[in-house]
Amino acid sequence: MLNPRDIETAVLAAINAPPLNVYCKNFKVWESEFADEGALDRFAGTFPVCFVYWGGFRREEAYPQQRYWDNSRVSVIVADKNLRGIDQAKNNAGGAYDLIKDVDGLLQGNNLGGIVEPLTGIGATPLRINKSMAVYGLDYEVKVLNPQ
């Protein structure tokens, strides 16, 4: 199994690239920043932002008695002031929808420099949407074939 920190670091490096890093300057590993309601509101001044965290794994046998797949899940939490980037119109990018589109474009099928099988997107889920922010979680499957 790959070290979870290695997966998080590789995903951070993959998303901190154009076109996303042209308008998003905050890329971090999740450290429970949104642990309470007030914490989320305090982050609004740093939007847009992308957080990455490893979400666990399950092991599956690939070939009897020879190898197994480590199937991990990694999530990217994206947050911005709104859904459609109205405030960022002058930059021609922004809003949670653009963050989702650009993160997915950078991760879907990416093998993170050859350390994993190409990533597969599982889905995007709204976590919080209100008048001051739009927060979504994007989940990806990370597969590694290991000797037993």
Image: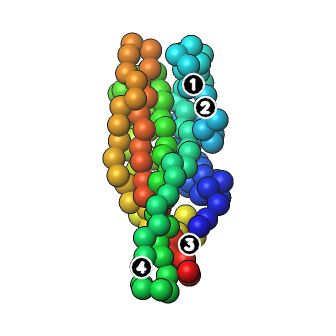
* Residue 44 seen from this side: no
Decide which of tag 2 and tag 3 comes sooner along the chain. Answer: 2
Image coordinates of residue 10 in percent, x first then y, are 61, 57
Question: Which residue has dot 4 on it?
Answer: 62
* Gap in angstroms between the C-alphas marked 1 and 2: 5 Å
| Picture quadrant where residue 5 is located | bottom right
* Gap in angstroms between the C-alphas marked 2 and 3: 29 Å
Image coordinates of residue 136 in percent, x first then y, are 41, 34
Of residues 129 and 26, the one drawn nearer to the viewer in this rendering = 129
Question: Which residue has dot 3 on it?
Answer: 114
Question: Which residue has dot 2 on it?
Answer: 32
Q: Do the CB atoms of the residues marked 4 and 2 lie less than 8 Å apart? A: no
Check the image and name the residue furthest to the front: 65
* Gap in angstroms between the C-alphas marked 4 and 1: 38 Å
Eye-nearest disc, 3 or 1 = 1
Of residues 43 and 75, the one drawn nearer to the viewer in this rendering = 75
Image coordinates of residue 115 in percent, x first then y, are 58, 70
Secondary structure category for the residue under label 2: loop
Question: Which residue has dot 1 on it?
Answer: 35
